[in-house]
Amino acid sequence: MCRIGAIKSRNYIHPSMALQLMQSQQKGHDNSGFAMVMQNLGGIFEPYKHLPTLSMACTDAGIKIAEDILHEIGFHRVMQWAPEVNDVPGLDINAMPNYVFETFDYPRNFRNAEQKEKEELLLDTRLKLRAALEPNEEGFAYSFWPDVITLKEIGDPRDIGTYFNLWTANDRFTAKVITAQCRQNTNYDIVRYAAHPFHLQGYTALANGENTFYLKNKEYQQGLHRGYIGFESDSQCFLYTLHYVHRELGWPLHYYKHVVTPLPFDDIEQREDQKQLLGIRQSLAHLEINGPNTIIGLLPDNTMFTCCDAKKLRPVVVGRDEDTVAISSEVCGINEILPDRDWETDIYPNEREVVVISDDLEVQRWKQ
Amino acid sequence: METMRLNDVTANDLPWKIKYDASRCTMCGSCVATCSFRAILPKVERRRMVFSEGNFPEPKARFSAVPVIRQAKSIRNYCRGCGMCEKVCPNDAIKPERNQDTRHPVITRCLGGDSIKRGGRKNLEGSTRTLDSIRVGRISQMTDPSLDAQRHTFDLLAPFGRILPPKKLPFSPDVDQQLVTNALTPPVNWIYPVIIGDMSIGALSWRMWEGVAMAVAYLNEECGLPVRMCSGEGGVPVRLLKSKYLKYMILQIASGHFGWNRIANAMPHMVEDPAGILIKIGQGAKPGDGGLLQAGKVAEHIQAIRGVPKADLLSPPNHQGLYSIEESVQKMFLSFNSAFKFRVPVAIKVAASATSVSVFNNLVRDPYNIVGGFFLDGIDGGTGAAHEVSLDHTGHPIVSKLRDCYLAAVTQGRQGQIPLWAAGGLGKTGDLAADAFKMIALGANGVFTGKLILQMAGCIGNDMGRCNACNTGLCPAGITTQEPQLAHRLDPEKVAQNIVNYFLAMDQEFKKLLAPIGNSSLPVGRSDALVATDHAVADRLQIQHVC
């Protein structure tokens, strides 16, 4: 069983907070992995917010393969950081030789390019890296995007935290948004790419549940966009649909909910916007999800949201204090990191709402 | 003399033999009166009885004339095994028995000099049905809970109409972040995933057709199931065309264009749009063989509805004006779309064939986005009348072909854009919910069914050659006849009741199939929910093999 969590704060926070959020839920997940995506970066990455950072776990050969590709395209490295690892014996971690976080400047011919062009270049580059690293498992390129860092590993989350020295907070490795999940994909093969959160062009998603329309989603998404690949986990479908609806179709976020869990036909008939809702249900029928799910998503502007399956078969809770909002599968995680909050303001979203946390930390409840 | 006798038709040449027990017969005459085929007749037999009355044998013979029932020995009036005689006999004195030694296929051709015609369906017996080797085998449990068929709500609807690719939807957000529509989109009706298949007035008795239409109205208005019925090619009563119930009807046009003069004339008076238009190019039970309504069934009201004289009515196997798939798109679809001002979806029905995927690809790639459904009809479906050689030796099974079309759509990322509707022997075992559900998981949006509807009404025909006389106009159940005496055997209200009840039961069964796989809407294309016990079936359909 997955447990998922997300923290969004006015201040830069350290991943130790995410570890604490998840650690108290450890009886619910199976301690088989830890994955997190940090966005809106602080610390040593703060000066480079506008430049893409590559998050990669790889062998020595993998580094060379990746750097050759990046140099060939014309990227120039401006910053490099590798976590200091604490390789004490007995840790339950299936570690890769290298964890690379490198920030690059764009190729010269792209410096004045449109934002959109740059974004396509970053995606193409990451896909190229992934393809080149895949054959001998020389490495895993998780994200290559400005202001985003991804760390994933197989093992016990507690030990993974120890290995990367993440239990002790510092102000060098921080972000204002951290999403985290503590389970490798035990449904299918255990591969690093299968651990959510997943990231694509500024969009991040993670989910707790099973997507029983996985095959339908996958078969449809494969043809929609070159970036919709992998499908090592049924939760990747949630990210791809988010990316497709919000970025490719350019629809406002609340239509994401109408795509993944459309209203019943009887309800649609009662609505003024029935024409649009029916059109969505028809044309995007293969992106509907089924089965028990809670989704946490992030948009490129750092707007965070959560929503559930149409029958509310998976729990989720949103809690907050003045400076921080946390979303968690179980309330004990929020109790751990926000013990002094007013728990009466906690939100347990229902099956027909989207809880949205804007970048200025305003929490909104949108009814579908 | 001997030679002539040898070639006379005897009961042993015919497909059914009448078993008659004179000792139980009360001579009530019910069997003879009820046999619509005149396959039995009263006859007087001369009997000789030898008896002795004294203390010692002193045999005497007495002759008497005894009335009995005998089988007609003719290739015209032969027993079809319908069993109506047995049904009406108060004493169980008579019944038909299948004759394994029948020479019917040979002598009928020899004596008639014409091809054999019959109704019923393709008799694909002797092997396990593909759908019966498939199970819904992906059971939700533990972290992915199954649903409760009684408590949860389910959305059991399927689209009829052309569905645009997402990027072609004319939606854009306004200042309030609401999507607004900037242009017209093709009409789409969401309907129950089982359409009552196209059986015409003419093929069916007016009382049968009325019963089906009543059932459809009741299912919609009282039961909340948006079931649609296809008219078949043969027109629609004007009273229905002008009524509000037209919205439950899918009007069919086939190559004979029968009844369309009236439909066109009624258009200005229609108070509702029909649910759709179905252009029939071919049908699966007798592909390449056109519709066939023999003159015997062209009663006065049929002549009126269709606007034809009393004559054999043949729908050619092809629309003679159509040269190509592209032309069918351009000409027929556009004219029907415009006739109803682009408010009514227009779909096409074709026979499953080795070439179905090509046809489907042509339609799904059409740049006009106007083909609103691909109705794929396989072998094993029923027909009112056809040449037996077509029924027995032409056709293509539906299951793999439906799957091929769906996977062709997947390859192109166009799944769902032209809804796929499948038919051809579905519900043959009486269990339509299971067959339909499996077809949906293989990629169908819905199914259509005809023959099963007749069986709900009381059709006693089966796949082993019983009855199958729909072509004769002598249907003993009053279903496929225009003879008033026969049609009156059928109670339209009872027909409607049976159909309604069957659909209500089927609706429950759909939920019982959705619940274990944890889905609340139709699992179109969810082939991962299926497993097959047959390796060849699993390979062919790309589903998991289990043993």
Image: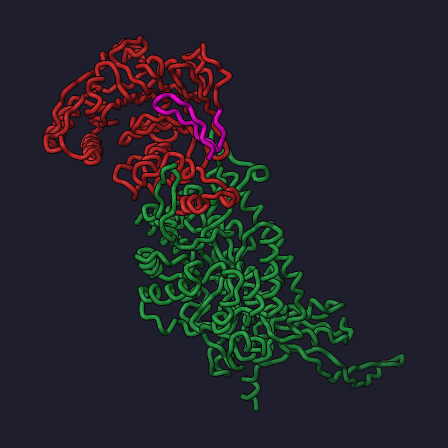
Give the colour in which the image draws chain A.
red
Relative to B24, say whether B221 is above or below.
Answer: above
**Residue B428 visible here:** yes
> Residue B127: x percent and y percent?
47, 57
Relative to A294, say whether B363 is above or below.
Answer: below
Q: Is residue B452 left or right of residue A96?
A: right
Toward the viewer: B503 or B378? B503
Residue drawn at x 48%, y 80% as measured from the top left: B109
Toward the viewer: B160 or A246? A246
Q: Does the segment drawn in magenta span residue A359?
A: yes
The picture quadrant where one finds residue B67 is bottom right
Relative to A277, say whether B85 is above or below.
Answer: below
Residue drawn at x 28%, y 12% as measured from the top left: A163
Q: Does the segment drawn in magenta span residue B479?
A: no
> Residue A231: x percent and y percent?
32, 35
Query: Outermost residue, front direction?
Result: B175
Relative to B371, say whether A336 is above or below.
Answer: above
**What quarter of the picture does the N terminus of chain A occupy?**
top left
The picture quadrant where one finds residue A256 is top left
Query: Outermost residue, bottom direction?
Result: B1
**Residue B229 visible here:** no
Residue range of the region highlighted in magenta in the rendering: A348-368
Give the colour in which the image draws chain B.
green
Toward the viewer: B200 or A48? A48
Q: Is residue B281 left or right of residue A13?
A: right
Q: How is the image coloured?
A: by chain
Number of numbered discs: 0
